[in-house]
Amino acid sequence: MSTSQPRKPRKRAREIREQSRATGMRYTEAMRANDRTRAGGQQAPPAHLAPARTLLLPLVQDALAGLFQLAGLLLRLRNVLVLAPDGELVDVMGLEGVPIPGAPIEDVEEAYWRVRNALPEGTREFVGGMVEEYPPTPNVLLLTGPDGGHVVHLTTLEVAEADLALLAAFADALDRAAGLRPGPEFEALTEALGELGRVPHYSWMPEGDEAAVARWVRQTLSPVLHSPFEGPLGAADHETLSNVLRYAAGWESVEVDEDEEAAAERVMWSMVRAALAI
C-alpha cells in the first residue's frame, strides 16, 4: 500500500504557486497562508488580484538603516526570552513567541520580509555603506542637480496593502503595549519590550523603557508606512517626481531643474525626519 500523502487539487496548487510568485513567499509559506484563508471560510483571491500599493520612495541611507535592523527585533519577539542571572537574554526552547494582539508575530515577520525583499537590488549594500551609490540597478534613478551634485536616488516599490496594514497594526500594538493602560491582553508584550530595552542584545537596538522600543520600531517602519508627500506641496511633489521617473525610465541618472530638485529635497528630508525623529 502506498504511504504517500494525497496530492492537493491541481487548482489549489496552481493558486498557491501564483500567490508564492506574486508575493515573494516560499511555497510552504504561501500554502500556510492559503490554509488560514480557507479555514476562515473564504477562498484566497488570485495573487495577481491582491490589492497592492505603489510607493514612490527616496532611497536615503540614514532613513533606511533601521528597516534592515528590524529583523533582529522581530526574531527576539518570535522567541520567548528570559533575563538570566548574568544579565543575558536567553531563549526558552519549545515555547511560542510573544503574543501580539491583532498582529501575530509570525505573520508580521513574513510581511516584513516581503516588503524588504521588494526593495531594489543593492539596497542593503548601499545602506550599509559598502557602496557610495547604487550600482546600475533597474528601477533606481539618481537625480543630480543643475550644479552636477547628487540629490537623491528614487525608486518605485510595489507592496501588498495587506502587508502594510499588518506592519502598521504591529507598530500600533507596540505603542499600545508601551502606553499607560495597555490592558491585560498586552501584558506579555509590555514585559517583552521592557526586557528588550534593558538588555538590547544588539548594539544598534534601542535602549530604554517600553516606549523607547515602540518608538524605534515605528521609526524603522516609517520608510514604508509614512508618506513623505504630505503637506500643502505633497501632491504637487508626487506628480513632479513621478513625471521625472516616467520620462527618465531606463536611465541610471538624470539632471533635474531647480523645481524638481526642491521637490526631491523636501521628500528626502520628510523621510529622514520620520526615520530619525528629528
Image: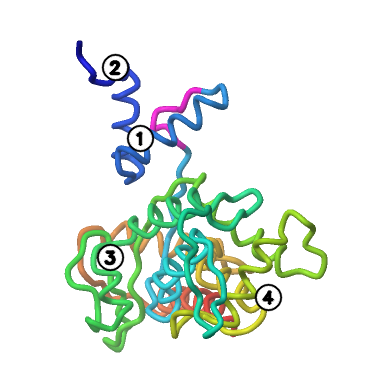
- SS at badge 2: loop
Tell me which amino acid carries mark 4: Ala
Q: Which residues are magenta?
A: 43-50
* Badge 1 amino acid: Gln
What residue do we see at 49% from left, 63% from top?
Answer: 92
Front: mark 4 or 1:
4
On screen, residue 235 versus residue 152, left or right, reads right
Query: Disc number at residue 6?
Result: 2
Q: Which mark is residue 19?
A: 1
Give the CA distance from mark 3 to mark 2: 46 Å
Binning the other alpha carbons within 10 Å of mark 4 as few (below 14), some (14 to 19) or many (20 upward) gives many
Amino acid beneath label 2? Pro
Q: Secondary structure at mark 4?
A: helix
In the picture of the structure, the residue carrying the numbered disc 3 is 140
**Are discs 4 and 3 less than 8 Å apart at CB?**
no
Q: Main secondary structure of the magenta part?
A: loop
Q: Is residue 230 above or below residue 101?
A: below
